[in-house]
Structure formats: C-alpha cells, structure tokens
Amino acid sequence: MESSLILSITTFVYAFASVLYIGSWTFKKEFLAKAGMLVLASGFALNTAGIIMRWIESYQIGYGHAPFSNMYESLVFFSWTICILYIFVEIKYHERIIGVFATPLIFLAIAYASLSPGIENTISPLIPALKSNWLIAHVITCFLGYAGFAVAFGFSIMYLVKPQKTKTDTLLSRLPASNIMEELTYQMIVFGFLFLTIGIITGSVWANSAWGTYWSWDPKETWSLITWIIYAILLHLRVTWGWHGNKIAWISIIGFLAVLFTYFGVNLLPGLHSYA
Amino acid sequence: MNLNEGESADSVMISKQKTEQKLDFTIKCNTFDIKFYDTGAPEEYKSNISIIENEKEVLKRDIIVNDPLRYKGINFFQSNYGVSSADSLTLEIESKSSKMVYHHTLKAGQSFDLPENGGKFTLIRYLPQFDFKGHNLGESFIGKVKKPDGKEFMIVLPIRFPTFDRMRHGEFVFLAEHYEKKYYTGLQVTYDPGVLYVYAGFILMIAGCFITFFMSHQSIMVEITKEKNDELSVCICGKANRNNQSMKLKIEKMAGQLAKL
C-alpha cells in the first residue's frame, strides 16, 4: 500500500503550504507566499502520483478500477480538484493572499481522509452497480463542481471578514480588494455550477443506461438538486438582478453547506449513493 | 418482471398501472449467476437470456448490471434477483436408536422409505421464509414423516439452523445437508423512444449555460474630449445586458491601465 503512504505525506506537505501562506499574510512577507506556492505545487504532484499509484495497485490486486469508489478515495480526489483549481486561480489573478483561505480547505479534505479512523483506506472491490466507464466522468465532473464551490466559499469568507473602510494596516485589511474577491467568488461559482450541471447530467445518463431510469429521488440526487437550485438562485440574483456584496457572499456560504451535506450528510441516509 | 431460471415470458407488468403488456417476442432466462469477491461483497449479477421469435432462438446473451439488453426498442436491465425454489435436497438422517447416519437426496414432492422401518419421508416444499412462533427462520424445507402406524407429523429444516430438528427429540434427526438453489432474475423492462430527445435536451442545457455565462452582449464606449486648456480627457463606459457587476470591474481595470499610460 505505497499509495496510502504517499497520500499521507501529501497531507503534511499541504499542511506546510497552508502554514507558509498564513505566515506570509500575518508577517507581510511576500517570499513566504512564493514558497507556499512551490510547496503546494509539490504537494499537488505527490497527490497526483498517489492517485495514479492507487489506480495501478487496484489492478495489481485484481480489482482493477478507477480510485473513485469510496469515501477515502473521493476525499483525496476532492483535495486534488480544489488544489488544481486554486493553482489555476493564483496563476491567472496573481493574488497570493487568497491562498490563506483556500489551502486550508485542500489540507482539511485530505487530512480528514488520512487521519479519521472512521474512513477505511484499503482498496475495496467495486460493487456491480459502479462497474461502468460513466463512473469516471460522473465523479470527475461532480468533484470539479464541488471544488469550484469550495474555493468560492473561501473567497466569500474573506469578503465578509474584510473591513470595508479602514485606513490603518490591520491583518484583515491586507486581504485583496473587495471587488476582486467578489468577482472571483462569482467566477468560481459559475465554474462550479457548470460542472455540477454536467455532473448531474452524466449521472442521469448513466442511471438511464444502467437501470432504465434517469432519476430515482435517492437522497444524494435530491440534495444535489437542492444545491444546484441554491446556486442557480445566486447566479440569477447576481446576473440579472445585480445583487452583490455581502448578500451574495452569504448565499455562497449557504450553498457550500448544502454541498457539504450532499457530500457527507446523505451517507447517513440509505440510498444508491451510500458507498461514497 | 421476474423470471425463474429456465422459464420464459412474452409479456411484462407495467408497474404503475398494473396492466400486462404483450411483447412481440418471448424472453427466456436460461441461467442466473452471482459471483462474490473474497471479501464477500458481490462482484457480478448475470442473467443469461435468450430471445425467442416464432419458436426460434434469435439472440442469446448475458445481461449484467450496467450492460442491459436492447431488443426492438425495448430495454432489459438487471435489477434484482432471488431464490425461487430449491431443487434437490440432500438429507442427513441420524437414527437415535442405532446411531447410524444415512444420506438421501430427493426433490420436492418425492418420498422415500426411512431405514430401520421408520416409515415414509415426503419432502413437501421449499419456502423462502418460514415463520416459527413469531421468528423468521429464513429459507426452509418442509417435509413430513408418516410412521408405519399411520401417525403423521411435520418436519421443518431451516437452512440457517441445521440442528433445529434435534429439538423435536424424535426417533430420527433430519438435517438439511446440501441443496441446489434455483434463482429467479428480476429484470427492469423499459420502452423509451424519447431517450434521444432527452439527451438532446441535456446537451442544450449545457450549451445554454455556456451561452448565458460567457457570451452575453457587452458594449464599451470611449469618449475623448478636448478640454479648454488643450488637455484631453478620456472617459470610458461599458454596458452589458447581463452581469453588470463584472462589467464594472472590467471597466475599472481598463481605466486603471489607461491611467498608467
């Protein structure tokens, strides 16, 4: 089980990256953030290697399936998607401080996978219902969607804690300009919404080709629809009604709570998705 | 629809209306198999199906979960399974008096003479559940013994509790040793000529999202005016039919870049 070891190391690398970003923000040292980016990128490389090795190991054991089949694997992949999205945003917008709120999320997802005793990290065989190539398309698109919402959540928190009018140099006033964070929240939500839409559609096409029904009101399906509707309302309010600022930030936070419930909460309820 | 192994059907029940719908062909379940992993988790549910038209087999293949059969616009999906009956049961019979152990294999409805002049044993039927004083004993075989003096009594042989018959304290103890299971396969049958339209709708939905988010109409106006003291003043404004918030940011960014020049 070398992949589990690599993924455990990844957890600590991500933790170190978070510390560097937070340090750079608190002590006003730009080079710490640059180092944070390098550490984060190497964590990302390890994370990728871990996922690929796990995939290979599953073939060696003889089960042979993509590593998206249980809670551990999905959390590791969740970290991966948030990480790639955040790296993209940092490169595109050159705002290093935003890592302060995004990197801890990357770390938390993988730390929960590696350290929580309730989460089994062994490679288990795939149940018949999941044996389909649609699994890969469905999981990747859904998790890109979740990652978009997670990063948007980080930005919304930053937006809300930043004081609107201060002249003194405080910790919170050093966060990026409000209008940039607002725009980024919006961009991330659009990204997440598009992928969640595609994720729900691929799931529906898969269900139809495997069971002959598009939608069966399983708890995860219902909650993904609730999440989708919350973000659809947010986008309508902003794009056509011109809502902005705190109101949008709060809806984004509520939306992310719905994402978390869709992801974790519904596992407590029985249903088609109760494996992950 | 549920089909026992070896049986065939030419109609399906419509689940909501409770009406029967005739098919223009016959579907037969040849075999049903479950495979398990070493961990005990199920690996595969597989029904071997034949399609029969005009008393000729036109198609024979396996249906597994995620790989349905489509024939003449009708889809058959593997959806559940169960044990319909058990075929032949091998009994172990212990005689209390002589301590001898005998074995006998028989099918439901068959009888045989018990050794040591113990009478006649008849295997009545297999039951998927058996209720004993309010407890569900699960899969069980029911048999009866007719003694030489004409007395009859019932024998219950639950598979999960092999020593159940000892509690009867009879002259013989009957144990269900081994039996052949016969499965039925549960197939979900759909007729859905609209799939293409639904999928076209899905594609339009995704395309629609792209268009609304990334292709809204935007116009930017630049006005250059000559001030009295020969200075030029540049004014830029923008308008978008959607998402004016992002437009505002874009214009501010442009103004900032212009100011630097």
Image: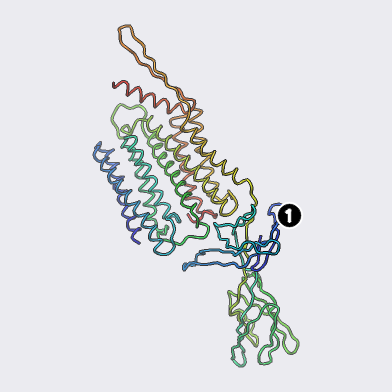
- Residue at 64 percent across and 47 percent down: it is B193
Secondary structure state at the residue bearing disc 1: strand
Q: Chain of mark 1?
A: B
What amino acid is labelled 1 in the image? Thr
Q: Report whether A195 appears left or right of B177.
A: left
Which residue is under mark 1? B19
User: Hey, which quadrant is residue B227 in on the image?
Assistant: top left
In the rendered image of this protein, does residue A148 appear above or below residue B213? below
Toward which corner of the image does residue A244 lie, by quadrant? top left
Residue B189 versus residue B240 in the image, above or below: below
Outermost residue toward the right in this view:
B150
Q: Nearer the viewer, residue A247 or B214?
A: B214
Please state if A147 lies on the left or on the right of B114 as rendered.
left
| Residue A270: % across, % down | 54, 55
For the residue pair B110 and A99, the one nearer the viewer reads as B110
Residue B233 image position (x, y, % from top left): 34, 13
* Of A141 and A162, the residue lying toward us: A141
Count of numbered labels shown in the rendering:
1
Q: Position of residue B52 (x, y in %)?
A: 67, 62
Q: Residue placed at 65% from the left, 88% from the top? A: B171
Name which quarter of the figure residue A157 lies in.
Answer: top left
